[in-house]
Every structure is written in structure tokens, then in C-alpha cells.
Amino acid sequence: MKPRLIVRVGLDAVRAEQQGRGEAPPWTRRLERASDRPLELTIAELLDGAPTVSNGLITVEVEPPMVQIRRLDSLPPVRSAALSALVAHQASTFFRKNGHPLVTGATWLAASHGSPRQALMAAVDLEVAEALVAGAAKAGFGIER
């Protein structure tokens, strides 16, 4: 398994850990979030000195309530790309906006034994998404997912 760097972002703290290092001891780091410090700078500081990963890309997991997650089984049976576009176009129907633009994503979940097919949808404030990308970039990383 290739080493992966995973960043978890919550309201109170951000954490990073490298998984899949084989025999090497795990690398982890945690920083408290301060209300007067931009998220971008907190992410950059968290990743400063992080071990390198082969492709330079990290995985970011945003925790509720910073991310809104919904499951619906009442959407029309469209292709995956159309599902993402549908959810993005109708974001205010599925998610609370609170006056902030959202970044959305959606995928179909595997159907289970006669149950309707469910869509898994997520949304995060655009400002948060931009801060994550900028903070990772300051530390020399890109975001894979």
C-alpha cells in the first residue's frame, strides 16, 4: 500500500496522519483551530514538515457540521456526471446555504436487495474549500480528494 497523507478538518482542530508506511512508525500531527487564525494558515502549518507522498496529493476529510451530508432515494436515475450536475444546480434544495456559496459532490451508492438506489451527496462552504486548497498548496501539496 502506498503511503497516504490524510487531513481531517473539524471545527475545533485539524489533524494529519500518514497511513501505509509499512514498518515505519506512524506520523501524526494535530493543531487546535483558533477563531482569529485563517483556516488556510492552520492547514499550511499542520502540513509543514509532513512526510512527502509519492504523488504530492493528500486526502482531506471535512467533519460535520462543516460538511453537510445527505442520502436521498428520490432522485431520477441519471448517470453519475449528471447526478453531480443536478445536485450542484439545485444545491439550495438539498442543503442549507446560510448565505454562503457551496461546493457540492454526489455519487450513487450501490443498490441493496430491492431497496431504491440512494444518492450520497455532500456540500461544504466554498470559502472552506478554497482555504483547504490554498493551505495545502502553501505546504507543497495538492488535494486528491
Image (cartoon, rainbow, N blue to C red):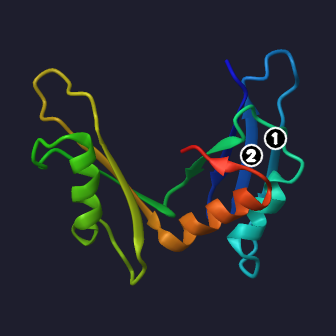
Residue 80 drawn at (x, y percent): 25, 41
* Horizontal and vertical percent position of residue 110: 26, 28
Mark 2 crowdedness (10 Å alpha carbons): few <14, some 14-19, many ≥20: many
Report the residue that reaches farthest toward the front: 55
Tell me what residue is drawn at x 72 percent, y 41 percent. 56
Q: Horizontal placement of 111 versus 103: left or right?
A: left
Q: Secondary structure at mark 2?
A: strand
Q: Residue at 71% of width from left, 78% of height from top? A: 35
Image quadrant in which you'd find residue 123: bottom left
How far apart in space, not on screen, are marks 2 and 1 (Cα)? 6 Å
Residue displayed at 21% across by 68% down: 93
Q: Measured along the vertical axis of the image, is residue 82 above or below residue 55?
A: below
On the rendered structure, is 48 left or right of 101? right
Q: Which residue is mark 1?
A: 28
Taking the image as shown, residue 114 lies to the left or right of residue 104, namely left
Q: Earlier in the sequence, mark 2 or mark 1?
A: 2
Q: Quadrant of the N terminus?
A: top right
Residue 130 in the image: x percent, y percent?
Answer: 58, 67
Amino acid on which disc 2 is placed = Ala
Mark 2 and mark 1 in contact? Answer it, CB < 8 Å.
Answer: yes
Q: Give the class, few, some or many, for how many residues have Cα within 10 Å of label 1's Cα (few <14, many ≥20).
A: some
Residue 125: x %, y % from top left:
47, 70
Q: Which mark is residue 16?
A: 2
